[in-house]
Amino acid sequence: MRLLIVEDEKRLAVSLARGLTAEGFAVDVVHDGLEGLHRASEGGYDLVILDIMLPGMNGYRVCSNLRAAGHEVPILMLTAKDGEYDEAEGLDTGADDYLTKPFSYVVLVARVRALLRRRGAGTAAPVLTVGSLRIDTAARRVIRGEDEITLTAKEFAVLEQLALRAGQVVSKAEILEHVWDFAYDGDPNIVEVYISTLRRKLGAAAIRTVRGAGYRLEAT
């Protein structure tokens, strides 16, 4: 799952990004409303965490512009303000939920997961079947026959990206973008490391390398 944080308090933004990354999300951060609108408009995000008081363009306008353009990405609004009018204005512009600062990090994660579950309930099936593999995206479990295959959070995320496009080639760049994030500046060969561990757990024939193009999950 890819999240976008639009928050001008840099310390808070970095803290949230680190915490959510540890939860298994890929997180991008911007500190300006106009940049946030641009990033969110490009699509590809599963949820936007949007502060209201932002330079360039406030969160109300970012939200209303996204909704006017037809973007349905879930939006969790953050604000230092408090009061029913502010909450009503935020929800009227199209936000899906609202959290007032200071807030508990545990509560924020719970709200994020609830919004993602709500979105997923009306979209793709939570269980992907590829050959003998059953990949439960909600429970984050992988089962072959009667046996469960234990994966780490990152291993599961890489496999999920391949399973969503089973039989198609998924490039290394696409995996990096969805499992890590745009800001990842480490060794791109990290993808090969995770592909290797998945092959050890799923079988060498499960993931085929298409030279110069990427990887393809095979039905085995």
Image (tube, grey):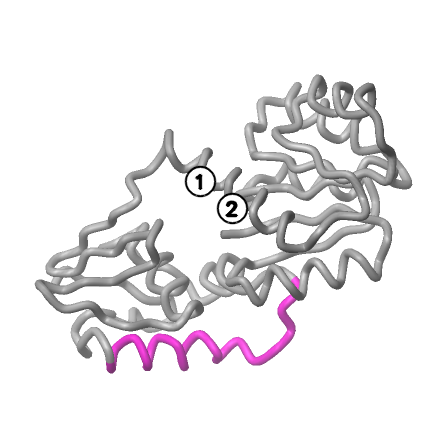
Indicate whether 131 appears above or below 122. Answer: below
The answer to which of 145 and 43 lies nearer the viewer is 145
Disc 1 versus disc 2: distance between alpha carbons?
A: 6 Å
Indicate whether 86 appears above or below 155. Answer: above
Indicate whether 121 appears above or below 190. Answer: above
Q: Which residue is mark 2?
A: 113
The residue lying at 68 percent from left, 55 percent from top is 105
Q: Secondary structure at mark 2?
A: helix
Q: In the rendering, at what x and y percent does residue 22 appear? A: 57, 67
| Crowding at mark 1 (Cα within 10 Å: few <14, some 14-19, many 20+) | few
Check disc 2 and give the amino acid type.
Answer: Arg
Label ID, residue 92? none
Q: Are marks 1 and 2 in contact (CB under 8 Å)?
A: yes
Check disc 1 and give the amino acid type.
Answer: Arg
Image quadrant in which the C terminus is located: bottom left
The answer to which of 215 and 101 lies nearer the viewer is 101
- The magenta region covers 183-200
The residue lying at 82 percent from left, 35 percent from top is 52
Main secondary structure type of the part rendered in magenta: helix
Determine if the magenta segment contains residue 187: yes
Q: In the rendering, at what x and y percent does residue 207 appear? A: 24, 70
Indicate whether 158 appears above or below 100. Answer: below
Q: In the rendering, at what x and y percent does residue 160 appear? A: 35, 57
Q: Secondary structure at mark 1?
A: helix
| Crowding at mark 2 (Cα within 10 Å: few <14, some 14-19, many 20+) | few
The residue lying at 24 percent from left, 78 percent from top is 201
Label ID, residue 117? 1
- Residue 82 falls left or right of residue 196: right
The residue lying at 28 percent from left, 60 percent from top is 141
Q: In the rendering, at what x and y percent does residue 5 appear? A: 70, 49
